[in-house]
């Protein structure tokens, strides 16, 4: 469908052709409108425009209305007046067809309100035509200038630039990457824990106190003659090979061993120190004299310690073992002997002494003896009434 503006231009051009065909002064607007089947609103509007043209003083108005079709006018201005009137009539026709609209709103047709009007179709250029020959007795009229087809007014919304997509907006500048955190020095790997060994770490002893029951408080008799002096160079462990049973039997057993040994023509009991299950320490033979034995080895140079009982049948107590290690540490320190020299009687002769259950603890005894040698080992002798009272308490159980 053509736009109203193009319809108006077409009617204006057709009106000029009508004027050329019937003469310059023969255009009767109402007749033209009726001939072209235009709305009556244009016919009515032509009369209104005529009155406005008269009031504006353009040309000399005719005495009454517009001249009839085919009438001739001798007023040169009449032609201009009618031409201008025709132009005004065309513009008025645009108003009548389109109607009033607020400024800035697009023109719409009567088909569907709110739809934008289609853009006008471009008109092909027209060749100028020569004016028709004037009739007899008619003054030649200069051909009217061909109307310059002005481009139709661009309607709101018809701006081609508006249809073009807006230029791409510049992309927002990417934010600079956050500053990388300052590299931190890697933490050193944790140190490997010390390798665990089967042997527990031995604490360092600071002081060891040993109470020794004197031989006279124990009830031993005086030593006989014939013992050999010697210099201690090693540590040796024994057992009596007689089951002890209750610990209160320990003092009487030691007195019985002395009698037995002296009855065998030995000067004294064969060992230097004795220990019971409660960890009580007893003084026996003088450490400056070599011991005696029923087996085939020379006990000279041996620091002899005997544990009361038969440790092939019985088991040594913790109190016995601790007291044995402390006494051995005392001997090692006093005589300058290494704890590593500690051995069992069976290591020197064909015997089961000191019994399997005690011999199996020699390794523990060596380690504990070595630890205790770093401490200050002191001995206190329990003699006289103090020693006798202690022995009486042991025998009482």
Image (cartoon, rainbow, N blue to C red):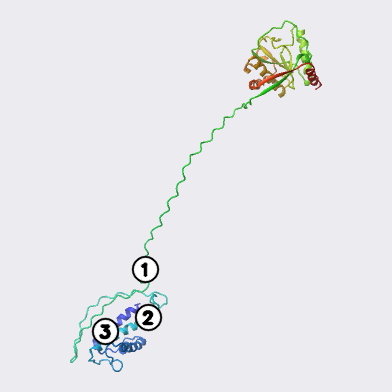
Residue 90 visible to the viewer? yes
- The reply to whether callout 2 and callout 3 are in contact (CB within 8 Å) is no
Quarter assignment of residue 372: top right
In the displayed structure image, the side of residue 166 where residue 20 appears, left or right: left
Q: Could you tell me which secondary element the residue under label 3 belongs to?
A: helix
Q: Which of the two discs, 2 and 3, labels the residue nearer the N terminus?
A: 3
Residues under labels 1 and 3: Cα distance? 37 Å
**Dot 1, how many residues are within 10 Å of its Cα: few (below 14), some (14-19), or many (20+)?**
few
Residues under labels 1 and 2: Cα distance? 24 Å
Residue at position x 65%, y 17% in the image: 333
Above-or-below relation of 303 to 189: above
Quarter assignment of residue 315: top right
* Dot label at residue 98: 2
**Dot 3, how many residues are within 10 Å of its Cα: few (below 14), some (14-19), or many (20+)?**
some
Total of numbered circles in the picture? Answer: 3
Q: Position of residue 105 (x, y in %)?
A: 39, 75
Quadrant location of the N terminus in the rendered image? bottom left
* Dot label at residue 16: 3
Q: Which of the two discs, 1 and 3, labels the residue nearer the N terminus?
A: 3
Q: Which residue is mark 1?
A: 162
* Dot label at residue 304: none
Above-or-below relation of 90 to 154: below
Residues under labels 2 and 3: Cα distance? 23 Å
In the displayed structure image, the side of residue 188 where residue 10 appears, left or right: left
Q: Could you tell me which secondary element the residue under label 1 belongs to?
A: helix
């Amino acid at each position: 469908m053509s736009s109203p503006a193009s319809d108006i231009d077409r009617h204006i051009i057709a009106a000029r052709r009508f004027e050329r065909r019937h003469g310059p002064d023969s255009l009767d607007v109402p007749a033209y409108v009726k001939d072209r089947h235009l709305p009556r609103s244009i016919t009515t509007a032509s009369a209104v425009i005529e009155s406005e043209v008269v009031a504006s003083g353009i040309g000399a108005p005719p005495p009454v209305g517009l001249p009839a079709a085919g009438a001739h006018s001798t007023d040169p201005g009449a032609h201009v007046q009618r031409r201008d009137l025709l132009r005004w009539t065309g513009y008025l026709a645009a108003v009548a067809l389109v109607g009033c609209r607020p400024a800035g709103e697009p023109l719409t047709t009567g088909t569907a309100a709110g739809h934008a009007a289609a853009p006008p179709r471009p008109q092909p250029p027209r060749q100028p035509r020569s004016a028709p020959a004037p009739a007899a007795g008619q003054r030649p009229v200069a051909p009217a200038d061909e109307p310059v087809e002005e481009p139709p007014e661009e309607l709101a919304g018809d701006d081609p630039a508006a249809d073009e997509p807006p230029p791409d907006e510049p992309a927002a500048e990417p934010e600079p990457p956050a500053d990388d955190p300052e590299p931190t020095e890697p933490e050193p790997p944790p140190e490997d824990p010390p390798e665990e060994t089967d042997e527990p770490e031995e604490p360092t002893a600071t002081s060891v106190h040993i109470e020794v029951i004197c031989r006279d408080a124990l009830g031993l008799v005086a030593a006989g003659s014939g013992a050999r002096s010697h210099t201690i160079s090693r540590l040796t462990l024994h057992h009596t090979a007689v089951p002890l049973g209750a610990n209160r039997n320990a003092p009487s057993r030691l007195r019985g061993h002395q009698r037995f040994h002296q009855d065998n023509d030995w000067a004294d009991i064969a060992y230097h120190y004795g220990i019971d299950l409660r960890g009580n320490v007893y003084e026996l033979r003088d450490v400056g004299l070599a011991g005696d034995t029923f087996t085939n080895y020379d006990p000279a140079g041996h620091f002899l310690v005997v544990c009361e009982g038969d440790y092939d049948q019985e088991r040594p107590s913790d109190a016995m073992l601790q007291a044995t290690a402390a006494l051995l540490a005392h001997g090692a320190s006093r005589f300058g002997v290494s704890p590593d020299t500690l051995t069992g009687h069976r290591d020197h002769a064909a015997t089961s002494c000191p019994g399997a259950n005690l011999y199996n603890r020699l390794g523990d005894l060596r380690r504990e003896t070595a630890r205790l040698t770093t401490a200050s080992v002191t001995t206190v002798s329990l003699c006289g009434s103090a020693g006798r009272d202690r022995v009486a308490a042991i025998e009482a159980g």
